[in-house]
Image (tube, rainbow, N blue to C red):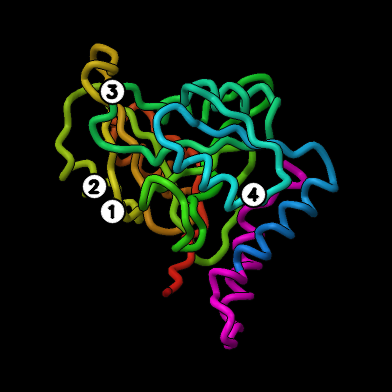
């Protein structure tokens, strides 16, 4: 975690693209600097990335584009395999599919659980720049690592919220908004995967939310029906680059 700082890397790339006004496409600027950044990180210590590669080759392409041609990537047939590799420290970070509604076996409920002093959280969203020649069309991924996210000025954050009783989405989003946490996306734990008497939700909210953010504590204090609200990472909002 000390040598790998995805939030700071995002800030560097934003500055580079923001001041660029030449004929060279901005996407090329990002690709060149991503290769350099990853090479510099690798020179400072062991740096490996686990990639979920069971069903769609797009995630391998996303990882290779982001981390360059020399960073070692390891293939994993399951999302839990990626999470385990990150949790046990055998890799620096893992590339996983963006959480979706109605997933049969969602991986995100495992985020934020501490094991042997390590805590796996979301730290980036990929690809960081639009475009590219990846297989699988417009696939998107998240990067997870044992890293404390940092605020970059344009961020989104993830929270896992647990409720003991069924609750409507409108009430959930309203309660979060009242606490100053503006939801932008919501994924629920499928009934087939949920425990009896347990409702689990993954919220993506606008802005940066630290693990000790007072708004989260206030949300729980004002809404006693919720048994848990855990910040499970966040990411610097990716660049949108024209053709």
Nearer the camera: disc 3 or disc 2: 3
Looking at the image, is 15 positioned above or below residue 194? below
Q: Position of residue 89 (x, y in %)?
A: 70, 26
| SS for callout 2 | helix
Find the magenta span and give its range: 1-29
Q: Earlier in the sequence, mark 1 or mark 4?
A: 4
Q: In terms of depth relative to the viewer, which is nearer, 117 or 133?
A: 133
Q: Please state, as top left, top right, bottom left or bottom right, where the N terminus lies in the image.
A: top right
Nearer the camera: disc 1 or disc 3: 3
What residue sits 84% from the left and 48% below the top?
A: 43
Of the numbered discs in the image, which one, if any, rests on residue 67?
A: 4
Looking at the image, is 162 positioned above or below residue 122? above
The residue where tag 1 is placed is: 177
Direction from residue 102 to residue 133 in the image, left or right: right
Residue 28 shown in magenta: yes
| SS for callout 4 | helix
Q: Position of residue 143 (x, y in %)?
A: 53, 42
Nearer the camera: disc 3 or disc 4: 4
Q: How far apart, in angstroms, are the residues tagged by discs 3 and 4? A: 29 Å
Q: Residues within 10 Å of mark 1 (few under 14, many from 20)?
A: some
Q: Quadrant of residue 186?
A: top left
Q: Earlier in the sequence, mark 4 or mark 2?
A: 4
What residue sits 67% from the left and 65% below the top?
A: 32
Q: Quadrant of residue 19?
A: bottom right
The residue where tag 2 is placed is: 173
Q: Position of residue 199 (x, y in %)?
A: 26, 25
Direction from residue 67 to residue 39 in the image, left or right: right
Q: Earlier in the sequence, mark 3 or mark 2?
A: 3
Q: Earlier in the sequence, mark 1 or mark 3?
A: 3
């Amino acid at each position: 975690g000390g040598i790998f700082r995805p939030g700071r890397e995002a800030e560097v790339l934003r500055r580079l693209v923001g001041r660029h006004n030449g004929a060279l496409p901005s996407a090329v600027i990002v690709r060149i600097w991503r290769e350099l950044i990853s090479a510099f990180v690798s020179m400072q210590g062991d740096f490996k990335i686990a990639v979920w590669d069971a069903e769609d080759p797009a995630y391998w392409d996303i990882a290779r584009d982001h981390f360059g041609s020399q960073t070692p990537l390891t293939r994993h047939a399951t999302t839990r395999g990626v999470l385990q590799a990150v949790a046990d420290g055998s890799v620096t970070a893992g590339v996983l599919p963006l959480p979706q509604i109605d997933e049969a076996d969602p991986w995100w409920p495992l985020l934020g659980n501490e094991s042997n002093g390590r805590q796996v959280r979301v730290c980036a969203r990929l690809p960081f720049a639009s475009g590219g020649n990846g297989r699988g069309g417009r696939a998107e991924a998240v990067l997870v690592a044992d890293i404390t996210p940092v605020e970059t000025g344009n961020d989104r954050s993830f929270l896992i919220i647990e409720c003991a009783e069924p609750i409507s989405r409108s009430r959930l989003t309203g309660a979060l908004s009242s606490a100053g946490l503006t939801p932008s996306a919501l994924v629920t734990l499928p009934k087939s995967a949920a425990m009896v008497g347990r409702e689990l939700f993954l919220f993506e909210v606008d802005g940066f939310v630290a693990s000790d953010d007072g708004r989260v504590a206030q949300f729980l204090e004002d809404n006693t029906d919720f048994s848990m609200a855990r910040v499970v990472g966040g990411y610097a909002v990716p660049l949108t680059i024209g053709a």
